[in-house]
Structures are given as structure tokens and as C-alpha cells.
Amino acid sequence: MTATLNETPRAERLHIGFFGKRNSGKSSLINGFTRQNVSIVSDVAGTTTDPVYKAMEIYPLGPCVIIDTAGFDDEGGLGESRVEKTRLAAEKTDVAVIVCADKEISRELKWYRYFQKKNTPVLMVINKSDILENVEEIAELIEQEIKQSPIIVSAKNNEDIEKVRHGLIALLPENYGERLITGTLVKENDVVLLVMPQDIQAPKGRLILPQVQTLRELLDKKCIVISVTTDKLTAALDVMKKMPKLIITDSQAFSYVYEKKPKESMLTSFSVLFAAYKGDLPYYAEGAKILDRLTPDSKVLIAECCTHAPLKEDIGREKLPRMLKKKAGNLSVDIVSGTDFPEDLSKYDLIIQCGACMFNRKYVMSRIERAKKQGIPMTNYGVAIAHLTGILSKITFTE
């Protein structure tokens, strides 16, 4: 995936998920909330099958992804598959809206508690106030159970929809959106050198997403940014009057850049930066130690987020497995991509996650939570490569 410098990638947007039973009016509520026809509306239960993801700007929330999901009461073989997709959408959700439309709220409360365990803020909404005769009774039941007053709306008549917007604003943490890729490593007027290999994996005429996002953040910080390909590193350093405070490169160029860099310059990689930005860097660094204990009998899971067609010298499918086998012998390596991530991780000795530029932090943390719960060590591409090449202790992490 690529992005231009003036657009917010989907993974960086606030993900707002709408959940509820079939025919509770989720799609109508979304259309009213966004003031657009985002979702198909029908009186037929189960109209929404796969989750619908719509990127848009919503004032004053900013860049968002609105997620319309299948009813979590769907039934049958196909229904179970739809509910599973709804669970996957829940793992990506930063703020959840649970829509109620009848007095039976046991399923809604079950999902409310699910989001609570994941520290996901939840807004409870009672829809169809135009036809429900027992709205106040439902509201009282909800308030008794969760100690939170629900918002009452009629999506059909577009009544009180603005209350949903205000409710979501109130739920957002004060520091939401303030995480930085480069943390406090650099500030205004610091010189930063980006060393970016343009090999077969780089999209022709474009930069990959982590490079784009990092570059944009450095420009916003008013840093002095110089970008070169790997073969021009020495030439760039020769013409620079002031040595860079920080050099950021691709993980697979770690060793070469480390050998050439000035002693006073810090070195890191896009993948290492994203390990902290999207995941749990201390957990990844601890997990990297397992690389020294792998044997030919070990089993490793490599998890990519991209679903691109495999290319020659692909880092996840070719380079990392080759490095692992050179280190530990002919061990077993499984590779998954996109949202394919096993529920049961018990057969693995280590998980190596990519930089996850395509996923939001909420989803990456759900993977980490699953690994921690099952006691499986986890690291990421950049941290693993730095460890395997013997320079992890010399890499700069975000402060």
C-alpha cells in the first residue's frame, strides 16, 4: 500500500465499529451519523454480510474508518462465518457503538464486556425510538448493568443522531492520536538521513507506506530530511556539512548502514520504529532472545500484514526464513498474510510480526495479547533482523 503525503492512511484513522443484532438498524444509524449512504439499508435481517469499512473525515473526530458489521446473532454455517468476521472487525475497533433495538440485551451486554476486557471504549445506543414502546425500560436495564446511560435515537427519522457524535467525542482519550513514529528521538532542525533501498519490492514510482508516514512526520517536526538510496549513502555523507543526528533505514540494510554511519549518528529502521509505534517494543526485544535458542525442531510463525503477491527476495517469505535456517538449521516456518492469524499459537516457539503498517495499533495489540495469553514469544521483522545480524544493542529505539 502507498499513500500520498496529504492523505491519512486507513491504518492511522480512528476505527469506529458499529455492532448489534440483525435488523437493529446499525446501517441506518451509520448513514445518519455520517450523513452519507455508507451502508445498504433494508428491512430484511442480515443485509450486511462482510464488514463494510469506509474511510472518511468526520468533524470533529478527524480521519475515521466507519465499520458496519453483520449482526452478532447471525445463525447457520454462513452466519457463523459472518459473526467471525464481526469478531475480527472488533479487534480493529478503537471505539465501539453497540446498537440495541429490543428488550433482550444479553448479547449486547456480552459484547460490551468483551470490549471492556480489551480496554475499548463503548457507546451504548438504543435505536428505533420511533417504534419501540418500552424505550425507557430498556434504557433502565442497560444503566443498571453497566452504570452508563445509553443514547436514545431514531435512525429512521434522523432524531438525536448528533448525540452519538458527542458521545463518541466524550469517550476518546485526551491523548488520542498523539503517538509519534519517531517519538522524541529528533526535534526541529535536527538532520535526519533516510536510507531507502529501491529494490524489486519497492512499488515503481512510489514509496512504501512506512517511509511515507515517517517522512511526513519528520517534515511536520521541521526536521532537515535527506533521502538517499543505499548505494548513495557514502556520497550523501561526504557532501553533508553536519552529520545526521538520526539515520533511518530498511531493516535488511542494517549491517551495511551501520558499517558506514558516523559514530555520532543514531541508527534505527522503519520496522523498529513501527514496532514501538504499532506494538510492544520491550516484548518484541525480549522475544528476539528466543532466536538464539531455536533448533532444527523449532517452529516459527511469520505474520505479514500485506497480501501482495510474493516477490523475489521477499523479506518475510524468503530472506527471514533463510536467515532463521542459517542460524538454527532446517527448522519449520509457517507464513500467514493479511488478517490470517491462528487462534491457537501453542505449536510455535516464536512469532515474527511484520511492521504492521497496514493495520491499526488496536489490531496489532490484539495479536500481541493473544500471544502473551498463550505464553508464546513474539518479535518483529526489524528487531529480529537486528538481533540476527548482531547489532540489536547498537540500534536506537524510540524514547
Image (cartoon, rainbow, N blue to C red):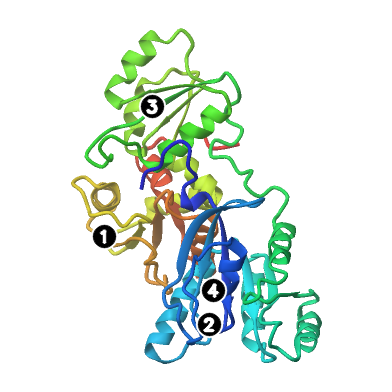
Marks 1 and 3, how far apart in space? Answer: 29 Å
Foreground mark, 3 or 2?
A: 2
Q: Cα distance, mark 4 to mark 3?
A: 53 Å
Task: Give the residue number, with chain letter if any, for mark 3.
Answer: 258
Question: Quadrant of residue 240 in the image?
Answer: top left
- The answer to which quarter of the image holds residue 193 is top left
Q: Secondary structure at mark 4?
A: helix
Label 4: few (<14), some or many (≥20) within 10 Å? many
Q: Marks 2 and 1: in contact by CB < 8 Å? A: no
Residue under pointer 1: 331
Q: Which mark is residue 27?
A: 4
65 and 386: which is toward the camera? 65
Q: Position of residue 116 (x, y in %)?
A: 67, 71
Relative to 38, is 233 on the left or the right? left
Q: Amino acid at mark 3?
A: Tyr
What amino acid type is highlighted by mark number 2? Phe
- Residue 28 image point, x, y percent: 57, 74
Residues under labels 1 and 2: Cα distance? 40 Å
Residues 179 and 153: in front is 153
